[in-house]
Each structure stands twice: as C-alpha cells, then as structure tokens.
Amino acid sequence: TIIQVNKIKANRVKKTSRILPMMITTTTMIQRRSFLLLPFAFYLLFSIQPSSAILPTAAIDFRSGSNSFTLFASQASFGTWPKEGAGNNEEMIPMFPPEDNSLLCSVVGEEVKKEFDPNANKYAMIVPRGTCTFERKALNAQRLGASSIIIYGSLGAMYSVNETLVHEGVSDPLKYTIWPADKHDYECDNGESKVPISSVSLPYNSRKDDPIFSGIASDGNECAINDSQFTETCASERCLLTGEIVGGNYLQACCAWDLHVWLYSDPYFVNAEVSVQAVFITMKQAAELLGAIYADKQNARVTLYRRPTSNSHISSIVIVLMGVAVATCGAYMSSSEYRNVHCDHLERNKPSSSSRRNLSPSPAQNSPAADNQEDDRLDVTMGMACGFVVISSLTLILLFYLKIYGIVKAFYAFGCASAIMQVLVLPLVLYLARITGSKSYWDSTYVSIPFEGGPLSRAEFFSLLASYAWCSYWLYLAFSLRHPSDESTFFWISQDIMGASMCILFVTLIRVPNLSIASVLLWALFFYDIFFVFISPYIFESSVMLTVATSGGPPTADPLLCEKYPDTNGCQGGDPLPMLLTFPRIGDYRGGSSMLGLGDIVIPGLLLSFASRIDEAKKLIARSVKRPQYVNTLSCEDINAKSCLNCRSYFIPVCIAYAAGLMAANFAVYLMNTGQPALLYIVPFTLGTVYAISLRNHEFYTLWIEPKFLTTADAIIQDKPVSLSYEEVSMQETPPHDDPPLNPIT
C-alpha cells in the first residue's frame, strides 16, 4: 500500500507485511549469517512505540504597534474552523468577558446585545478554562458578539469546591477543596516544592493565587523561591497544590502539566448552534499573549487561522521515483547475463550461412562469480506462486495475533545486512581495490567461518563486518528511539538503503519463467491486497493490514495521557514496520513520511525483470543467430540501439506503466483520504501493458507457455548449439498444427 503517514491522520497506513516471506526466502537462499548476531538481536527485542502529541493545528498572529509574534493553538470539534493561512482571515480586536461572568459559564440569553464597539468588524474573546465546558464558553462568547474564542489554560481551573461538604457545615477549606489530580494535572517527579499555608488564599482564588505559582523566582513563584531547582526540572514553570500538608505549616506543590488539549463538544448541547471559531493555548502562551495585550491594548490585534498544509507534497513524488528506480535497477540487473555477452566477441564470430552456431561464452560467464550467481537464481513455479500467496496470508494473520513485531525487526535487519553486503558494500570494496591496484590483496583468502560454505576473502570478510555493524546500529536505534524515523536522519536513510538492497537482490535472483506464472502471482496478490485492506475488518473486527503495518495498531489510550506518560499501556504502536522505503515530509509541521512497501516494488519488479530479460534475449539472439536483416546489414552497436526502440520492446513500456500505477495509487490516497493497496493500480497497469504489447506483436502464446527467446538465449550463454533462426524463435501466437513445437537446443 502506498500512503502518506502523518501524526494526525492515523488512517493513512502503510502495509509492508507482504515482503516478509520474500525476505526470509531470499536470506535463506543467499547466506546464512544472521545466527552470528542473534544473541544481540534478542537483547534488543523490547521496544516502546508511543503515540504522538496533540498537535496544535491552528495559529494566532498577534500584532500591535511595537510587537508581533505567533502562537500555535489546538482546535475544537465544534464551531467553525478558520481558513488556512493568515492572509485568508480577518484581524480581530481582543476582548475579555464581563466582570460578573469572567469564566463565561453563566448563561447568556439570546437577547443580549453586543456591548462593544459596533463599528469594529470582529472580536476575539479571551477566556480561561474552568467550571463549565468548552462549548458552553464558546456559545456564550457567540451571544456576546464575539467571532472567535481563545480559551487558555489556568491553574485555578484545576481546583473546585465540594459544595456538599460546605452545605453540611464543614468550614475547613483544606477539607472541602477538591484538589488537582495526581498524574492528570501535575507530576511531582517533574518538580516538587512546598509553599507556606499562610501565603495561599483558601479556597483557591485564581486571580490572587495564580501569579504566586507561575513563572520563575524573580516573578514571585513561591515554588521556585522555596526550591531553586524547581524551574530547571518543571517545563511549565507552574505548580499546583496537592492538598498534602508537609512540615506542619506547608502545603506540597508539584509541577503542573501545561499541554495543548483538544476542545471537545458538550454532549448535552443538542440544539446549540455554535458557529464561532474556538482554539486553545497553554498557560505559558496565555501569559505572553495577555502581557502583550495589556501593554498596548489600544492597538492590539489578533488573527486566527489554520496552519497551512498541502495534500500534494514533494515527498510523494520522491517516493514514487525511488520505487521506480529500485524496481527498474533490479530488473535491469537481472538480464545482465544476456547483456554481458560482449559485442566485440560476437563481431569476431559472425554467423556463417549455416543455420547452426556454436558460440563460446564471454569471460564474464566463465568467472566463478557468474557461476555462483547462476546457482543462486530461482525460477518460480506455479506451485511456488500459489504457495507464496498462502504463506503471505498466514504470515500476516500470525503477526496479527502474536504481535511479534520486535522479532520481525531483528530478522529483517540482519537479513538486509546480507543484501547490503552483496549489492553495495562488497562491490564498492572491490571497485576501490581495483582502482588502487590492491585487488590481489583483497581477493586473497582471509578467514573461514563455520557454516559459511567456504573461506572468505579479505574483501568479503570486511564487507560482512561492515554490513552487519551498519544494520546492528540501525536495529539499536529502532529499539531505543520512540520514533526513530522522525528523530534520526541516519535511521531512515539506512532503512531506505536496506530496503533497496533487499529489493534489488530479490529481483535479480528470483525469476518468473513465463507470463502465465507472472499473471497468477500478480493477480493473486492483487486480490490479496484488496482483501486485507478493505474486507478483513468485517471478518477480524479490525483491519489486519492496519494492525500489522502499524506494529499493533494505533494507540488506544487517551492522546493527552500518552503525551504525558508514553510508557503507559495502550500508548504503544502506530509506527510502521520497517519493510518499506520512506522519505520525510520536509517542511510539513505535522511531520510524518511518505512510504512505499517493499512488496509493492519486488512483486511488480518480477514482471519488470521478465520484460527486461525478454528484450535482452531478443537482442542477444539478433546478434548471434542468423538474421540477415540485422546481422548482415547492421553493426552490433546499431542493433543494440535500435532494438530498444522498436515495437517489440517490453521493458521500457512496462517501467512507464509501473510508474503510472504508483502515481495513480498516490492520487487515490489524496482523493479518497485513506490508504490504498498499491497493487490495485499497479497490477492492471503493468500486466495490461505486457498483454497489449504481446498481442500486438503476436507473441502472447509463446510468452504465456514457454518464451523461446529465453530458452534460446540461455542456450547461447551456456555454450550449447542453437539450431533456430530469429524468425523461428519469434513464434506466432498460434503454433503450427502439423509439426510439433521446435526445440531450440539440439
């Protein structure tokens, strides 16, 4: 599934679990080195994945004669939202509630008229939270003539009075005061102090007491005065009384939470028509805003607006380009065995008039490396294709119930270490050795590792250590950081390199031999994608794909609680599994990333590989088998150039179709505002392109059953005699009825 993930739109989720069976298969087939670091992997299996904070999605621009600044605010689930951008909203004059209704909790009748300047365009009511609901305050502000309401946090809102005890005659304010709640309103671990009882007005009076519990010591904060380290540990610089008496004459005070909150609706407001814009700011923000207003009340103006966002983002384009580049690169490399038959070798061995040829392979095919690569390659059978879909489904359901996401991350990291070694690190080491003249030194045998299938050269051993050290550090970050992709640039860049290496290695080693197997595999996964994204919630009560892709599903606990205590049960989850390519949404205040699962690369990549091998096989046959119109009239270089552009080419059109499918999936995400299974768009685009070209070229039948291009090209590079001309290899869609099909190898 291709998606855009950000911190406030949890419904856009990345599906990555389709790559798991591929990763396990590839790693097992290539190397078995992961066991060397398994103890370290299991040491890191415990991770914390907390939810994000409540994001302030609105902003307030303040302007006066000599001052201007911007404050970020959270919004409400009632009323109207301001437009995006300050330029699309009008300036407003800040105003305050009447003295006899300072909290805007007393009912304001519909007949109340605006008590402020009738010539002014708009007003923004500024009121502290407390006593009544947010929506009640907003409705009263609307009836007073305000166009917007700015509600701010207040220490006094955390206290209340038990009226029942007062009516019963309890006179001690320490007993009938309802004190702030531990953990919910304050946290003593963030800062603790004590305050003389004589300095506090009881019951708590917000106007008198808030100033003596706010700010730093020089501002008169009693908590900071009595504990010099209080403001160093308390981010809010504000404290709340807990009601506990310490030392006889002191009250315990602890650091107050000062966070943005979402302004929820009042469930008892059934017919209330609240139309004003409502936002919330913290206590520290309110102190700055109120101070600026009182300093120049005559010229003070505020503008409320939503912080600008963009549905289309450069990261969406980058992630599509990354996916196309990786799939194309892997597919191009998969046909290198045909391409490596050197042109100058074929020019020296022009075919004679005889229809039989015997080409000796180029040095590239005689090398041990080429032999090993050939041994590693695997042709997918029909049974493998069907079994792969079944195993993928079972793996996804298993992860849904067992939730062993830490183990998956560990095995993925060390599986990718093997891929990085072969795709990136080892070729780089050998290249540097060649240009520095030290190739013989690095090629010499250095060490033998048990169960590794033979000795390792210095280059292989160094590449092995470097790759595993790289991926081990990546795994350490994955388990030690709460949101590693947001907190570490190294992490997401390394994750992209790991994923790209795994995809390239998989596409170069796993091959589909004909169009029928490719069709069964892709169409089966097409329906697999649709089922687990759109249908599974009706069977499993929640989306299997969503739950697995987000390491257990989005957090279920209250977002404000998770912001305060991210280790709390119900606050873990939400971060996607690492089997994907990611690119951060740079410049987006919501954070997040654009992501593309590796399964959406390697599955279409197998079809791209098939198309690339068909094209390269045609070119190889055209250079080596008798074909007068090519071999006798054109040079080998001309054949290479022109055969890529003729109507028989598959690779380039299929690559374009793959890119178009990814772009269509991206567009669907923005259009429907929900995650989309990318194969829903990629499979019809890519397979449809192959079907159309093969039917146009009258090659559909031979590609569907047994592509003679591939078998003939394989015979050429394996130094076996070939008895077919190019025209005989290019069988028509309908085979002859009189004669049996020709065997290209004699």
Image (tube, grey):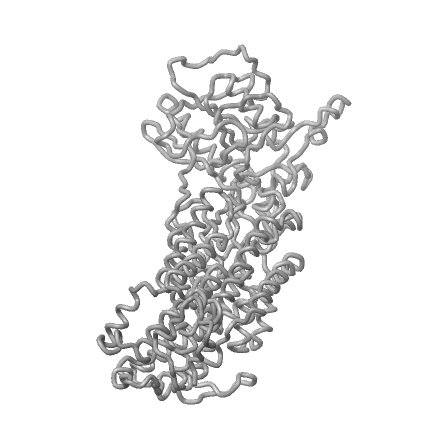
* Left/right of residue 527 with respect to residue 498 in the rendered view: right
Residue 206, given in percent of the width and then of the height, sits at 57, 28
Nearer to me, 415 or 560: 415
- Relative to 350, say whether 498 is above or below: above
What residue appears at the point 60 percent right and 68 percent down from the top-left corner? 43
State the image quarter where residue 39 is shown.
bottom right
The C terminus: image quadrant:
bottom left
Kindly tell me whether residue 465 is visible in this rendering.
no
What residue appears at the point 61 percent right and 26 percent down from the top-left corner? 131
Nearer to me, 289 or 604: 604
What residue appears at the point 61 percent right and 33 percent down from the top-left corner? 158
Kindly tell me whether residue 67 is visible in this rendering.
yes
What residue appears at the point 39 percent right and 56 percent down from the top-left corner? 659
- Relative to 134, say whether 186 is above or below: below
Residue 149, given in percent of the width and then of the height, sits at 49, 26
* Left/right of residue 553 with respect to residue 338 in the rendered view: right
Residue 494, given in percent of the width and then of the height, sits at 44, 64
State the image quarter where residue 184 is shown.
top right
* Left/right of residue 208 with respect to residue 696 in the rendered view: right
